[in-house]
Image: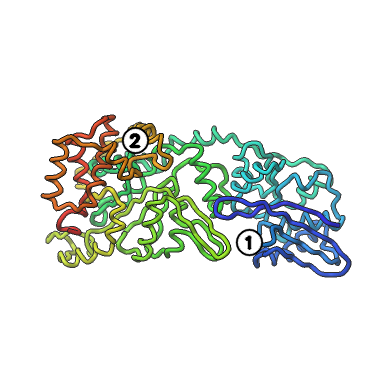
Amino acid sequence: MLTKVYGSAVFGVEATTITVEVNVDIGIGYHLVGLPDIAIKESNFRIAAALQNNGFRIPGKKLILNMSPADLRKEGSAYDLTLAMGILVATGQLDARHPLEEYIIMGELSLDGTLQPIRGALPIAIKAKEEGFKGFILPKQNAKEAAIVEGLAVFGIDSIKQVIDFFSEGIELEETIVDMKAEFYEHLANPEFDFADVKGQESIKRCMEIAAAGGHNIILIGPPGSGKTMLAKRLPSILPPMSLHESLETTKIHSVAGRTMNKGGIMTSRPFRSPHHTISDVALVGGGTYPQPGEISLAHNGVLFLDELPEFKRGVLEVLRQPLEDRDVTISRAKFTVTYPSSFMLVASMNPSPGGYFNDPDAPVTSSPAEMQRYLSKVSGPLLDRIDIHIEVTPVPFEKLSDTRKGESSIEIRERVTKARQLQTDRFVMFENIHYNAQMGVKQIRKYCALDEASLSLLKTAMERLNLSARAYDRILKVSRTIADLEASEVIDGNHISEAIQYRSLDRDGWFG
């Protein structure tokens, strides 16, 4: 007897439906074909134990199990339940009252028949709906995540016995229902980290607000304990709230990486990723034998924070250059290519010298100008070229630290940022890949960042006197456009240019020259 059951495989952030064909023939043997990996090949031991512990068995017959399309590599243990249900129906141990072909069935089996969570539940559910499946049966831990997809019945189960009873006895499964919009908007107004907790640093807060409003990459330079990490962690709280589309896109990536296991539901807050400086280039951009999303994709629609930037291996930093420009990363293998989105804000921090302090004779640890220059030169010019804002962070004086008054909250700052972003959204509505100022190309800069004679003269004087590099010119114009947007100003004036010039510390003579 031949039986077909349906599962799904995830490649990149998209799913592909897998047909599991189970054929029973005369003889003895268990043959699993269709490019399964080791985890799937070992499934027969888990399936045998799970069936035996629930009153069923794998009969002593010749079983041929084919995972189609046969030329597509399958990986992971999520096909255990799919294979087990196919075996039960094909061997006549289960008389299905509901057509198996109407359901996607996925789940990893424990030896007692209980189910373990799987990866990629959301993209699988999206694909199942697209292809017209009636329902999706999967582990209970993943049900809330899959139920985000409207128009698909999602059934979260605890054990294989529930699935067997559903198909053989007609005992109904409880459908998981999620009000996606209610859940999404419930969490928007409660940031975990708030700028109200930051003492002093008003100029840095202003700088972070500008970076958030224009989507600008930013680097913070300052001694230990000056608040660089504290400020960076609070940046997502002032970014505009994610749209439903952004939330779904972000949740898909985290689902594929297994980051939503046991959490479920839609991601409502922007991700904040802070990899350690010992990270490899593959872990940062994604890849591996069976490609998985890297840190830059997990930071999609959020913030990637690189603390102690010069401590990262140079090769690791260089792989950031292309994703920063293209806002996606493509991983190629001999037989397939996957693309992960990676539109993120880069926030980096660094000490100004190996000792951690500026060239100050009163500092606890001093470094010579040559040592500082050598340390700073670990960060390449092409990478710095993609960072719009450079800001020096100084330690907070005791008077500010001991001040009991609360600062401006993240919610108040976010309101201004959101208004500025809306202006940019309206401005770039005709451009498919440009949504905020940081993404502007040369043509858009010339069109939307036009200067009057006085502003142009000010910029020229500043570049000559401060010895600013040529790469600073476009960056200053982009940032000044954002400053103008925060004031809802149609034109860029001298004040906007003056403030933007302050945010190019590393271009000045005495840093990188």
Query: Horizontally, is 324 left or right of 253 in the view?
Result: left
At which x and y percent is residue 160? 75, 52
At which x and y percent is residue 490? 27, 30
Query: Horizontally, is 149 left or right of 275 in the view?
Result: right
Give amino acid for label 1: Glu
Does residue 122 appear in the picture of this structure? Answer: yes
Q: In which quarter of the image is residue 69?
A: bottom right
Label whose residue precedes the other's in the sequence (2 or 1): 1
Element under disc 2? helix
Query: Horizontally, is 304 left or right of 44 in the view?
Result: left
Compare residues 234 and 33 and report the one nearer the observer: 33
Q: Which residue is drawn at 17% across and 65% down?
A: 367
List the single residue furthest toward the front.
443
Tag on residue 133? Answer: none
Mark 2 Cα-neighbour bin, 10 Å: few <14, some 14–19, many ≥20: many
**Quarter placement of the N terminus:** bottom right
Q: Name the residue under label 1.
A: 75
Does residue 412 appear in the picture of this structure? Answer: no
Give amino acid for label 2: Val
Compare residues 169 and 27 and report the one nearer the observer: 27
Element under disc 1? loop
Q: Is residue 408 above or below residue 9?
A: above
Q: Separation of disc 2 and disc 1 at Cα?
A: 43 Å
Q: Mark 2 points at which residue?
A: 417
At which x and y percent is residue 495? 18, 36
Q: Which residue is drawn at 35% across and 35% down?
A: 424
Q: In which quarter of the image is residue 84?
A: bottom right
At which x and y percent is residue 511? 18, 58
Q: Is residue 148 above or below residue 335?
A: above
